[in-house]
Image: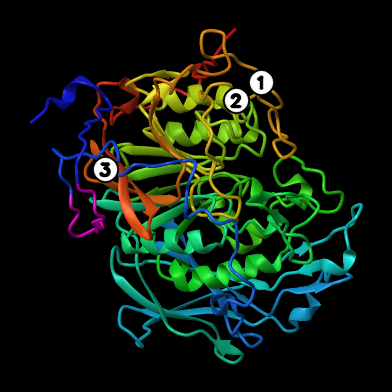
Amino acid sequence: MPDWSKSSLIFIFTIITSIAFCPITANKPELHPSSIVSQTSIPYDRDATGSDPLSKLPFNDSRLADTSRGVIPSQVHLTYKTSSSVIVSWSTGQGLIHSTADTKNQHAAAVPTSTVWFGTSPGHYTTQASSNATTSYQQTYNFTNANPTFNYSSPIFHHVTLQDLIPDAPYFYKCGDSGAGVSQEFNFTSPPAVGAYPFVLGVVSDTGLTPNTTVTIQHLVDAKPQVWTLIGDFSYADDLQTNGSSFVSNGSFAHVPFPTGTYQPWWDMWFRYMQTAIMSSIPLMPQHGNHELEPQFSANYGIGLDGGHQFQSYVARNPVAAVATASGSSSPLWYSVDVGPAHMVYLSNYAEFDVGSDQYEWLRQDLSSFDRKTTPWLVATFHAPFYSSYTAHYLENECMRQAMEGVLYTYGVDVIFNGHLHVYERTFPMYKFAVDECGPVHIIIGDGGNIEGVYKTYADDPGKCPTPSVPSYQKAGGFCPIHPYNGSLCAGSQPAWSAFREPSFGHGILTFMNSTSALWQWNRNLDNEAVVADSVYITRTPSCSSKQLHFKDDLNTDVYPTTSFS
C-alpha cells in the first residue's frame, strides 16, 4: 500500500484501455485503487463535437406538457435540508402571460393547502406534514423594446419540510390538497446520516433543456447518486425572447437576448421535465448562476437580489431561503449544509463578496464553526471559476478569487465545484495559480448540455489569449487586472495546475469512501453513453494543518491573504 502520510492530496494516474461506464452505487461502489483513470483512451476532436446541437427541446414535447388541470400539483421536486429532512416543493395553478403583472397572483384564485403524506411503504402513508409556506413572483418588462403583453405571473409554489426521516430509507409520498387535488405517488431514498460512508454525490451545471441535457440527466440518474447538486444555470429561460422565440444562426447565437428577454414559461417546462427525470426522486442542493439573474424593469444588472429585481424565479421555485436560514445565512444566495461526510458551502459571485461584506463574514463564521470530526470533507461551490484555461469568461471571477481564496485555503477546502464555462476541467490541488498540495482541487463541470453549446478554445492556443473584461452581469467586485504567468495574461501551454480538460458534455460523481479518500469520476456523454473519461482519487490527510480533524481557527486571526501579481 502507498504511504498516504506524505501529502494532503495525492493523485494516482493510470491510463486504461477499456473505460466502459460502470455505475457507482451506495451499496456496492466499484473502486479500484490501482486503476485510476486520468486520461481518456478515446480520441477527442474539439473541432468536430458531433453531439453539440444548439437546440432546445420543442415546446410541444410531451415531457414538458402541463397536465395539472388547475390545482393538481405539478413541478414536484425535492431539496436537501439536513440528514433527516428534505423539502418537497410543487406548483399549483398556471403561469400566465399578460399585459398587467398580476401582483397578487389573483389568477391563482383560492390557494390550495400544502400537505405531504408519506411513509416507507407504497400507498401506506403513516405521516403527514403541512405548511403555510408558499411563494410566487412576477417578471415585468418595462424597458426599451420590451413588449409588456408578455409580462409573467407565476404559479403558486408550495414548500413542505419532511422531518425525522430515517437515514437512507425508501419513502413514498403524495402532495397537494385533499379537497382540491393530490399528486400521483412519488418515491425517494432519504439522505444518509451525517458522517456515513460511502456517500455518492452527483454534480452537474449549466443544464438548460436540450437533447444533450436529457442524456446528461439520464446518465446522472443511472449512476445512482444519493444527493445531487446543480452549480447554477438551470433553464436558460433568458436565452429566449419574451415571446419564446430564440435566435440561432449557423450553429451560433446571432443574438442572445438577455437581459432584454426571458421566457418565464420555460422555467415551468424545465421543472415539469425534471420532475419525472430526477427531481421528484433524488434531493437537490441548488446553486445559482448568471442565467438566474433575470433582471426586471430597466433590464440593468445589479448586485445580489437587487431589491427583489433579480433571482426572482430562482428563489421562488427553490426553497433556498429556508435552507439558508438554517445555516445562519441572511441571504438565499449563500448557505451551507452537512451532507454525508461533507460540509458543503454555497457562495455567490453575483452578490457582494469583498472583505467585510455580509457574505464574507458569514463564510468566516461558518468555516470556523463546522465540525470536521463529523464532516471531515469540506467542499465549496460558486458559479464562475477562479481558474480556467479556456478563453471564454477568462479571469472573469478574479476579484472574488482575490477576496476569498485565502479564506478557503486557510480553512482547508478540499474541492471547489464551478460551472459557467461549458466545458470540463479539473486542476491539481492548487493555490495562487500554482500547484499546492494543501490547496483545493478545482473542478469546472459546466457541461450539462445547454443551448449555447460547448466552448472549444484554450487560452494557451497560439494567438488566442483573450483580453479579460467584466461582463454586464458581473457587477460585484469590479475589475481586478492580473498577469499571473510571469507577467503575461496567459500561459504558453496548458498551465501546470491544469490536470485534465475537455470541451464536451457530461456529469460528475464524487464518492466519499472514508475520511481521507474520495473518488471523482467525470462521465462524458459520448455516443449517447456515459463514458468515464477522467477519474482520480482525491486523498486528504492531516499533514496540512488546515485539514486536521481538530482544526479550529480563532476568528480574530488574520486569515485573509490576498494574491498580489504585477
Kind of residue sitting beneath label 3? Leu
Above or below, 480 against 303 in this view is above
Q: Quadrant of residue 44?
A: top left
Q: Which residue is mark 3?
A: 519
* Label 3 secondary element: strand
Kind of residue sitting beneath label 2? Glu
Tell me the tag on residue 480: 1
* Label 1 secondary element: loop
Label 3: few (<14), some (14–19) or many (≥20) C-alpha neighbours in 10 Å: many
Q: Quadrant of the N terminus?
A: top left
Tell me the tag on residue 398: 2
Magenta segment includes 505: no
Q: Earlier in the sequence, mark 3 or mark 2?
A: 2
Counting from the top left corner in percent of width and height, residue 227 is at: 38, 57
Counting from the top left corner in percent of width and height, residue 553 is at: 41, 24
Q: Quadrant of the C terminus?
A: top right
Label 2: few (<14), some (14–19) or many (≥20) C-alpha neighbours in 10 Å: many
Residue 135 visible here:
no
Type of colouring: rainbow
